Image (cartoon, rainbow, N blue to C red):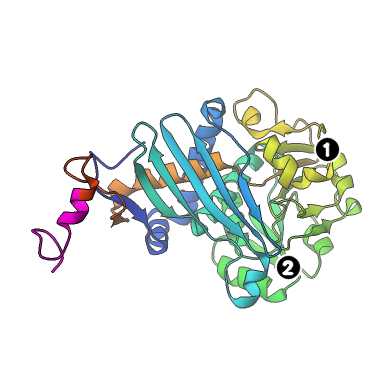
Amino acid sequence: MTTLPGHLAFVPFVSVDNMMQLIHHIGLERMLIELAAAIEDDFKRWESFDKTPRVASHSADGVIELMPTSDGDIYGFKYVNGHPKNTKSGLQTVTAFGMLADVATGYPLLLSEMTILTALRTAATSALAARHLVPRGARCMAIIGNGAQSEFQALAFKAICGIDTVRLYDIDRAATEKAMRNLAGQGLALIPCDSPEQAIEGAQIITTVTADKQYATILTDNMVGTGVHLNAVGGDCPGKTELHRDILLRSRIFVEYPPQTRIEGEIQQLAPDHPVTELWQVITGAVPGRTNGDQITLFDSVGFATEDFSALRYILGQLQRTGLFQRLDLLADPDDPRDLFGMVQRAAPGQPGGRE
């Protein structure tokens, strides 16, 4: 991992503008591929991470969560919210920021926006999982829910899994029209659909990425035939699901971290001991992914802290080369580490180096 050199009296801060510039500097599809590789590298060393379900504070309007992890050398966490009603007042459903810190000293190494980065890492993780699980020759993907994450999902599956056709549906036609505009010219055949049933016709990959916090049935059991891969992204907190329970009972289910997914994912509908396969086991080759063409595979994606850690680690590695960051004055750095009070006093107006 590339890091900024030496002991720093500042913390590199990647703002929203920096992140957007970084995407255009690297190229969106290349960045998705490289993020997926970083996430895959960390899944391969899964057992080296401290792991815990995210710490959630629920309210009637949404949820605020902290997602921490550490590999023993670097500590990382993400702050993220989920407030589905926000869009009605012109606000984002999800906002986030994240930090990396040096375990040996406790000093922060990076502070970054993660609203955009979360969309990127979610799409990269979805496509990474799908690479092991989609039926052979899959080229057509349905996306049900055409909100803020839909375009990232489509382009990640194009770049990483080779899809060439996307069928789009949302209960809000304006959302589908938005996705159609944004994906125009990206090398994908785009088909707007009038119902979930129409969207999944001929699709070997079905992504559900809706936002409403409710026990929803976006897909009913009779809609899902054999030999498809389901990428369930929207169900990510207690009381929020997208798939009928009977679909789960017919599927081979893959998850990131069972103690978290059993609380938040589609599998909250199932018995606590219902068998699932952990994604890291597939990535390391310890357990096979899809084993036959007729299987229904389901990636019950809720997002896990190691993925955010990987994404932040990737961003940190880009900073020295690109310079796309700001210097954040976040660290008190007195000449004598025992004299914090003296540093404050010397900053008084009229003192040498103080404010006038």
The answer to whether residue 177 is seen in the rendering is no
Residue placed at 86% from the left, 51% from the top? 244
Using a 10 Å C-alpha cutoff, classify the residue at mark 2 as few (fewer than 14 neighbours), some (14 to 19) or many (20 or more): many
Callout 1: SS:
loop
- Image disc number at residue 17: none
Magenta-span inclusion, residue 101 = no
Residue placed at 85% from the left, 50% from the top? 224
Look at label 2 and name its amino acid: Asp
Residue placed at 37% from the left, 60% from the top? 18
The span picked out in magenta is: 342-356
Residue corresponding to mark 2: 170
Residue corresponding to mark 1: 294
**Residue 286, picture quadrant:** top right
Left or right: residue 33 compared with residue 344: right
Look at label 1 and name its amino acid: Asp
Q: Is residue 188 above or below residue 52?
A: below
